Amino acid sequence: METKEQNLIKEIKQLKEKRNAVILVHNYQRPEIYEIADFIGDSLELSRKAAETDKDIIVFCGVRFMAETAKILNPGKTVILAAEDAGCPMAEMINAKQLKELKKKHPKAAVVCYVNTNAETKAECDICCTSANVVDIVNSLKEGEAIMAPDKNLAAYTQTKTKKSLIPWNGYCPIHQEIKEKSAVLAKKQNPGAIFIAHPECPQEVLRHADYIFSTGKMLDFAKENTNKTIILATETDMINRLEKENPKNKYLSIGGLCPDMKKTTLEKVKEALEKNQYEIKVPEDTRKKAESSLRKMIAIGGKHGK
């Protein structure tokens, strides 16, 4: 006998076919959401899939800036955010007005925006970046200095990898910011021989203990290529579900917390979104065009993974 969850998954898959929809799921989502995904990935991978899709409807299981990115790249398609209130605190830490003021103070600087920003902020950028391609993006700039917004930790990490002078905004991901150095030290002490992988949104005092600093997509690549390892992760805890699904032969430990916004998406909400076409994402056309330019430049430079 099928469980309620299995029934929901079956109904969603049928609805998806009926509506000619694609379901894009971020790595930090609940494990049951993986079961309805056409594609699971990080922010850059999902941006690319959104840009490539031939489906009429894009259902995003993630947070608002990701769904906005899909709409910016696909103005002719219907883009739905399954959980209407799934936001990103970091993306709200800077707005277009604040970025304009920062640009006035540094008129010769290029402007690099993390994809974790809203559409209006992206419209004020020269180019976007993700945690995986940020070093390539910054090093591709002709300018000698660059504003980096909103993540101060990503900027600090990038500064160690470039000769460019970076001007950071004071934003951060609350989940990664809360990961403590003492937790990293203790986890390594308790698990001798373990490999410690940290996300570049972590503070510098955590990153200095890392064996590798990877985006979630690169974490996944590493887990696939390495077996029978103990891997300590400094990122959102539910990334472990994704890694265990791909390579259960490793042992995974997390010192990170849970992102409440990423957990707002449920199977019931996805089903309802598909049935009612609700929580459609809209971006004003003038904003969309400007933001699209910064995203297309990023995609053109390449790099396989994002957040």
Image (spheres, rainbow, N blue to C red):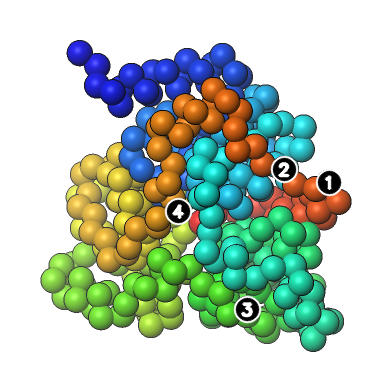
Q: Earlier in the sequence, mark 4 or mark 1?
A: 4
Amino acid tagged 4: Asp
Residue at x 74% of width, y 67% of height:
96
Read off the residue under disc 3.
Answer: 169
Determine contact: label 3, label 2, CB under 8 Å. no
Amino acid tagged 2: Lys
Q: Is residue 132 above or below residue 67?
A: below
Determine contact: label 2, label 4, CB under 8 Å. no
Work out how far the residue at label 2 is from the one at label 4, CA to CA, in angstroms: 20 Å
Read off the residue under disc 4.
Answer: 261
Work out how far the residue at label 4 is from the one at label 1, CA to CA, in angstroms: 27 Å
Q: Quadrant of the N terminus?
A: top left
Which quarter of the figure has residue 162? bottom right
Read off the residue under disc 2.
Answer: 282
Q: Position of residue 126 (x, y in %)?
A: 78, 65
Under circle 3, the secondary element is: loop
